[in-house]
Image: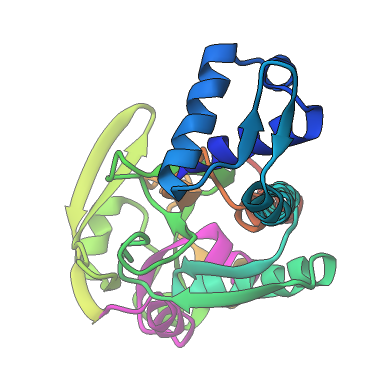
Amino acid sequence: MIDNLLELTVFARIAATGSLSAAARDLDLSLAVVSKRLSALEGRLGVRLIQRTTRRLSLTDEGHTFHARCVRILAEVQEAEAALSRSRDEVTGVLRVTATRGFGRRWIAPLAVAFREVHPEVSVHLNLNDALVDIVDEGMDLAIRFGMLSDSSLIARPLAPNFRVLCAAPSYLARKGMPRHPADLAAHDCIVFGPHPGRDWEFQRDGESSAVRVKAAYQTNDGEAAHTFAVAGGGIVQKSIWDIGDDLGAGRLVRILPEFTVPAAPLQAVYANAQHLAPRVRRFVDFCSERLRDAWRWGE
């Protein structure tokens, strides 16, 4: 098909310039290549398009008819290329995003609304799922995730700082007491969540690591349910500061063991291919990064 297009281009240029040598100069091709392409086109069509003599060159009747169509075809190809070039910078189309339920509701959904106020030609499909979604198989443009990237074929871009917090409701702490050391957690009601909830909680302090196996008083696959369990006084939970920062500020939750560091999962945008990223995806990632960093209010 590309060869056919080159043949049409060569023929149109010969007709416009009136000679094979002039067409060759305009197209930056050798005279031999131009002659070969013209012969190939005439051979494929089974008609002579150009009448050649030692003194002049002219289009045959078939050549005139074919030339008119050829010009229209090449014009449409040029317009298609121009339209595609313009579309590379236009923020349009369907933006398919997946995120965890809690973070998606609290942060990504409002950001999507703000993004569409700037780019109204975009429509947003937001898939909220605490399970790890295969963005390629599910046809997603990107995922907003907490966690390290396990698939090396994907691209991850950090969006904003993050750290995890151990916390519980004041009502729970009044009933069960405040833990003073990670080892104390073994005697407490704890809340574990996620697709594969872990009961071994890790801590760091002064460069030293420790772990404690907790009692899972509540277990759920839903991060928002774990959040609700904690606010209702069900027990102690580990959550991202993005999920529970407002509850800490309002006193609905209290931070536990603040002198110990809980391993943090980075907040990232994950997508399949950075080289040909659609403008809507690239702009949305930039938009989220800017807005989330502006919203950060929890120190280092």
In-image side of 243 versus 80 (left or right): left
Can residue 289 be seen from the camera position used here? no
Question: Does residue 260 lie above or below 10 as drawn?
Answer: below
Left or right, residue 44 beside residue 193:
right
Q: Which residues are magenta?
A: 220-247
Residue 4, compared with residue 35, is above or below; it is below
Q: Where is residue 227 shown, x and y percent of the image?
A: 44, 77
Picture residue at 64% right of the left edge, 69% below the top: 93
Tell me how the rendering is colored: rainbow
User: Was residue 224 drawn as part of the magenta stretch in this picture?
Assistant: yes
Residue 26, picture quadrant? top right
Q: Is residue 264 left or right of residue 91?
A: left
Which corner quadrant of the image does residue 236 belong to? bottom left
Q: Residue furthest bottom?
A: 232
Measured from the top left, where is residue 108 in percent x and y? Answer: 61, 68
Q: Does residue 46 appear in the picture of this structure?
A: yes
Residue 98 located within the stretch drawn in magenta = no
Residue sitting nearer the eye, 275 or 79: 79
**72 and 232: which one is in front?**
72
Kindly give the residue lying farthest to the right in the view shown.
118
Residue 20 lies in quadrant: top right
* Left or right of residue 221: residue 238: right
Q: In which quadrant will I find the C terminus?
A: top right
